[in-house]
Amino acid sequence: MSQNVVMIGLGYIGLPTAALIAKNQIHVHGVDINQHVVDTINKGQIHIVEPELDIAVSDAVKAGYLKADTKPIEAGAYLIVVPTPFKAKNEPDISYVEAATKAVLPLLKAGDLYIIESTSPVGTTEKMMELIYSERPELKDQLHIAYCPERVLPGNVMYELVNNDRVIGGVDDKSTDKAIEFYSRFVSGKLHRTNARTAEMCKLVENSSRDVQIAFANELSLICDKAGINVWELIELANKHPRVNILQPGCGVGGHCIAVDPYFIVAEYPMESKIIGTAREINNYKSFWCAEKIQNAKLEFELKNGRKPSVALMGLAFKPDIDDLRESPAKYIAQRVLQNNSNEDHYIVEPNVDEHKVFKLTDYKEAVEKADIIAFLVAHKQFKNLDLSGKTVLDFCGVIK
Ligand SMILES: NC(=O)c1ccc[n+]([C@@H]2O[C@H](COP(=O)([O-])OP(=O)(O)OC[C@H]3O[C@@H](n4cnc5c(N)ncnc54)[C@H](O)[C@@H]3O)[C@@H](O)[C@H]2O)c1
């Protein structure tokens, strides 16, 4: 196998992976359709926020092992790391994977390795194999085709890329062998062999498992609210049981993985994935419920005080202490609460973001001082130990517990 690697997609996963492979003195030709991304990387700079990535990319570009381009070239291995969002009706959209595959199709030759890393519905790798062999029948069974999902934690990617275990599934044993040999050149974690369909499902199941467990905690929070029980205390006490480990409730589930990947299972297996589908519904409903709670608190305040209250919405990110707002339930709640309401009565707070194109942001201390109602949507560290005396507080994420 030639030493060269083509990496299609240079985002949060593709770029760190490209830099890591390049660090191991393997030439990487990184491809992205975004010219700005390509130009930035070729200057030895990065377009995303990730600790240590700047140095890794700068070193790799300087050493001549990493180069970015808008078009692929011939190589020994092709990695597909493009987005896989969902379309209307929560169906997976694999058109980016298809486009990336079509881009490398004319370059493929016998013995090459083709790997999909993008989170994908079950059967995607086989579908791409059929696409490749229908266009290039002379290559039938001559390629090594595999799926290898990514499971890194943003913020710790450069460490986890090397040290996490990986699940690697080929369309046949020969492909699995080749893919394992490839990853063993730059991954120290264990490489677990399986087939492509199991590897695809494994990624989806990991995130669905998190979603279901969070849904259980969110469901408890709804029950406890009605029953007049403090859910945080309840979970702490229940977790004293040696074999119980309930997660914490919040204002929903967000981000581009846990809130998305379960739909890839539900869309394909709707009759069988009852718990997974219901968990998605519960976690989405929790955000709606939080927005309703805020509206009700506003009405109660107005009835009692004869004037409209001012409201601080604390946090927009999808989890504590990050600046990522993708699929964020807090953002959804803020949008709902602001609907048909004048902006003047609301203070939107997100201490990890300087500016937002839709929301006018207010400093968290100023918002808490000015607002009558304080709704905690994200448990950012800045929100702990604030003076809340005299305020109506809605704590959806356990800031004060
Ligand atoms: N970010 C994560 O934490 C994470 C973790 C595990 C898995 N994943 C999965 O990895 C995949 C990539 O995610 P990401 O976060 O890196 O996405 P991203 O949006 O950060 O990056 C994807 C890049 O691919 C480029 N692109 C799109 N179509 C292309 C094409 N046809 N040819 C070349 N470039 C193309 C885009 O311009 C973009 O720069 C997704 O399937 C995602 O679900 C992401």
Image (cartoon, rainbow, N blue to C red):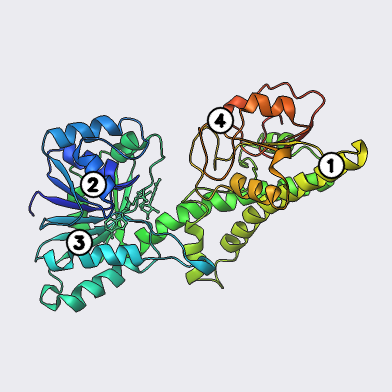
Q: Which numbered disc, 4 or 3, marks the residue closer to the eye?
A: 4
User: Is residue 132 toward the left or the right of residue 364 in the image?
Assistant: left
Identify the secondary structure beneath mark 4: loop
User: Which numbered marker is on residue 175?
Assistant: 3
Mark 1 is surrounded, within 10 Å at the Cα level, by few (under 14), some (14 to 19) or many (20 or more) other residues, namely few
Percent from the top left, x then y, of residue 125?
Answer: 30, 66
How far is the residue under mark 1 from the one under mark 3? 57 Å
Chain-order first, disc 4 or disc 1: 1
Chain-order first, disc 2 or disc 1: 2
The reply to whether discs 2 and 1 touch (Cβ–Cβ < 8 Å) is no
Quarter of the picture containing the C terminus is top right
The reply to whether discs 3 and 2 touch (Cβ–Cβ < 8 Å) is no
User: Which numbered marker is on residue 228?
Assistant: 1
Q: Which numbered disc, 2 or 1, marks the residue closer to the eye?
A: 2
How far is the residue under mark 2 from the one under mark 4? 31 Å
The residue that disc 4 covers is 351
